[in-house]
Amino acid sequence: MDPRPLPEDDLLHALAEQVGAALQARHLMLATAESCTGGWIAKMITDIPGCSAWFDCGMAAYSYEAKQALLGVRPETLIEHGAVSRETVVEMVSGALVTSGASIAVAVTGIAGPGGGSPGKPVGTVWLGWKRRGGYPKAELFHFDGDREAVRRQTVEAALRGLLELAR
């Protein structure tokens, strides 16, 4: 079986448009909290004309300090579980809703490579989290293949697909 082709910009743009249409139809505002994608999800969203009707803000929080200051991730969570963990992504997505005017959020933390991996958390390990205000967070673990670009592209696609599902 051939590996799945990497999502190209056209696919990511089409997904972002679908997310926007779903959010706008339900009068939802979006916030993003990104680590390994560095704002790529927000970039795809803000490439859509008129996104200000449904996009509130995006936060690229790479360091432990930024995750704590911008998203309210507890130091104990980072020490006990690390930045790339279910616990951290849940606190990131919840914090994005607390610190923004958004009603729905996505968060991502992972190891895009080429370095930084370990036997327990190899390169390509990514946690994604989604949450609607007043609801419970959903977190999902992914293991993406490829180089840094490939891991990040696949992460953006998964984030947008998850938002589309949650917004419907």
Image (cartoon, helix red, strand yellow):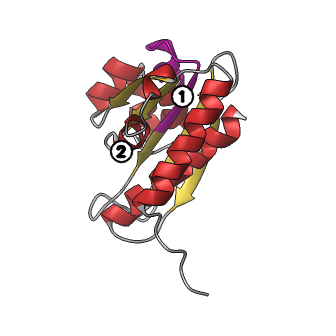
The disc placed on residue 40 is 2
Labels 2 and 1: the sequence-earlier one: 2
Question: What number is the disc on residue 126?
Answer: none
Is 48 placed above or below 154 here? above
**Picture coordinates of residue 146, whole percent (x, y):** 39, 71
The answer to whether the residues at label 2 and label 1 have Cβ atoms under 8 Å apart is no
Query: Residue visible at 61% across and 28% down?
Result: 23
Say whether residue 124 is left or right of residue 159. Answer: left
Q: Amino acid at mark 1?
A: Ala
At 39% from the left and 65% from the top, the residue drawn is 150
Picture layout, residue 29 above or below residue 110: above
| Residue named by callout 1 | 105
SS for callout 2 = helix
Name the residue: 32% across, 18% down: 69
Question: What span is colored magenta in the figure?
Answer: 94-107
Quadrant of the image containing the C terminus: top right
Give the left or right position of residue 156, taking residue 75 as reference: right
Quarter occupied by the N terminus: bottom right
What amino acid type is highlighted by mark number 2? Answer: Trp
- The answer to whether residue 154 is magenta is no
12 sits to left or right of 115: right
Along the viewing direction, whichever of 73 and 71 lies nearer the viewer: 71
Q: Is residue 100 magenta?
A: yes
Dot 1 falls on a residue whose secondary structure is strand
Regarding residue 142, the answer to whether it shows in the image is yes
> Distance between the Cα atoms at labels 2 and 1?
15 Å
Is residue 128 at all visible to an observer of this figure?
A: no
